[in-house]
Image (cartoon, rainbow, N blue to C red):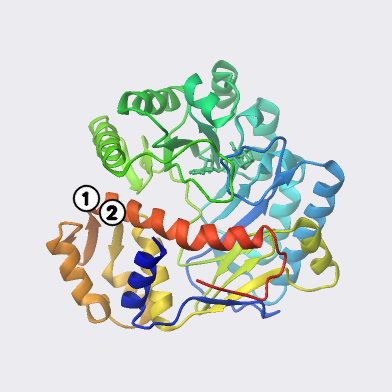
């Protein structure tokens, strides 16, 4: 598996050099020069831990959580204060973990961000179904939150059991969502669970829209090596049939596809912290992607607080990209939206996409992965499946390996992928 991703990486980046992450880092982050910059804030606390979940999180403790939020605000000041002029950013997303466990402090965090940045497209927060009540929603709304995303996983008892999740009180959820409105109400589902059918998924999606969602995300289940999930991955052929069937179902109902995994029932509903050219990440495990570098913060909550206390950034690893590496990174994450505009690539890199990857575009067209309309490359159903398939490889070859190490070591010396 890593052989395939390794070969592809060498081909696309035109070098045998692996991605080298080192423990050296800059105290000054050159974000002022970045356009289309997003902000992500990580809150790594959960009331109980799900065995399938790969994200950086620990069991909630009030004392640790309070200390963490103080450090987080300090990190925002450390980075934000590096530049004198306020910087426009597209969005601010809170992920976790379970950010709503600190609903009462979300405003303080937003205020700290607002001191240095101007948020132009709204603020999103991830919620656990247990957090969806009128009181929490109102606190978030009053703090300035405009989008929420609820981790449903499945409404079906069978899959809730397999995933170790509780039954969801859907009528309470529906009345809370009706009482407090948001621009986007997204619901997350896990797709390609063993034996899952298109009917299972379509009934989940229909229920989501009838409860008050206007956006859904169906994330393919990934069996990370370091998690202890008893769930195994669905075979490839079955998965492809399921993805095609559910995509056709959503399109037939008039839901539009806003990215590989998301569908919306209203044109303005969107929820994505990923499709940004550049982003700044605050908190444990948060990543920052800038023009020429990518950095990842430590996963360890205590080490995070300690670094901040000493006035330093909590960066654990940094990679300084070659130009080709940065191009591949850009293309990979832009393609997540199912569309790549040649003009955007040229604006970012100052060179035409055709000149850099003309041969690959030709092959992708011949294989029926993409269509071209007036300088925009759009993924076909087949292309979307293979993107998904490749993303799975990428996740297991790169993210699984990196997160596996970072969970054990707060500041590893280096990682080569
Ligand atoms: C941070 S959680 C969402 C908020 C909240 N913590 C919750 O669990 O409801 C982010 C989402 O990642 C997805 N996810 C978690 N583990 C996954 C896995 N192994 N494979 C695919 N998706 C996964 C789930 O859909 C989950 O809702
Ligand atoms: S899925 Fe959500 S609640 Fe479960 S451990 Fe992961 S972040 Fe926490």
Q: Position of residue 216 (x, y in %)?
A: 42, 37
Residue carrying label 1: 382
Q: Which mark is residue 386?
A: 2
Image quarter for residue 373? bottom left
Q: Position of residue 55 (x, y in %)?
A: 60, 50
Q: Is residue 398 above or below residue 109?
A: below
Q: From this viewpoint, which residue is outermost toward the left?
A: 366
Q: Is residue 203 above or below residue 290?
A: above
- Nearer to us in this view, 161 or 118: 161
Q: Position of residue 224 (x, y in %)?
A: 52, 49
In 3D space, how far apart are the residues under numbered discs 2 and 1 (Cα atoms)?
6 Å
Q: Residue at x 29, y 58 (%)?
A: 339
Query: If the picture is divided into quarters, which one holds ligand 2?
Result: top right
Mark 2 Cα-neighbour bin, 10 Å: few <14, some 14–19, many ≥20: some
Q: Is mark 1 within 8 Å of ligand 1?
A: no
- Nearer to us in this view, 49 or 86: 49
Q: From this viewpoint, which residue is outermost toward the top?
A: 171
Q: Quadrant of the N terminus?
A: bottom left
Q: Secondary structure at mark 1?
A: helix
């Amino acid at each position: 598996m890593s052989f395939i991703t390794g070969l592809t990486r060498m081909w696309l980046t035109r070098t045998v050099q692996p991605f080298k992450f080192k423990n050296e880092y800059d105290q000054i982050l050159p974000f002022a020069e970045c356009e289309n910059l997003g902000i992500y804030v990580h809150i790594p606390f959960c009331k109980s831990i799900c065995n399938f979940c790969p994200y950086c999180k620990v069991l909630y403790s009030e004392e640790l959580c309070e200390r963490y939020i103080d450090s987080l605000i300090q990190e925002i000041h450390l980075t934000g204060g590096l530049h004198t002029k306020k910087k426009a950013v597209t969005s601010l997303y809170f992920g976790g973990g379970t950010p709503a466990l600190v609903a009462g402090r979300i405003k303080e965090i937003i205020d700290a961000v607002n001191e240095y940045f101007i948020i132009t497209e709204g603020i999103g927060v991830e919620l656990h179904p247990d957090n969806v009540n009128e009181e929490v929603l109102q606190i978030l709304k009053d703090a300035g939150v405009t989008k929420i995303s609820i981790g449903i996983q499945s409404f079906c008892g069978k899959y809730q059991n397999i995933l170790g999740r509780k039954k969801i009180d859907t009528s309470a959820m529906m009345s809370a969502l009706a009482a407090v409105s948001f621009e986007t109400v997204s619901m997350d589902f896990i797709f390609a669970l063993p034996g899952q059918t298109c009917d299972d998924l379509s009934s989940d999606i229909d229920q989501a829209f009838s409860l008050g969602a206007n956006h859904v995300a169906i994330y393919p289940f990934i069996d990370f090596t370091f998690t202890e999930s008893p769930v195994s991955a669905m075979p490839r052929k079955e998965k492809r049939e399921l993805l095609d069937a559910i995509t056709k179902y959503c399109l037939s109902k008039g839901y539009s596809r806003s990215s590989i995994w998301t569908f919306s029932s209203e044109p303005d509903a969107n929820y994505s912290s990923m499709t940004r050219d550049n982003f700044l990440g605050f908190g444990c495990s948060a990543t920052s992607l800038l023009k020429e570098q990518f950095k990842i913060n430590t996963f360890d909550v205590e080490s995070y607080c300690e670094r901040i206390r000493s006035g330093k950034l909590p960066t654990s690893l940094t990679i300084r990209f070659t130009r080709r590496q940065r191009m591949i990174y850009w293309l990979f994450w832009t393609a997540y939206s199912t569309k790549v505009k040649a003009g955007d690539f040229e604006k970012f890199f100052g060179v035409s996409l055709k000149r850099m990857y003309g041969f690959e575009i030709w092959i992708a067209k011949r294989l029926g992965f993409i269509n071209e309309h007036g300088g925009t490359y759009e993924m076909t159903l087949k292309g979307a499946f293979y993107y998904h398939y490749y993303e799975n490889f990428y996740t297991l070859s790169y993210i699984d390996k990196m997160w596996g190490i970072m969970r054990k070591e707060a500041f590893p010396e280096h990682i080569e992928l």
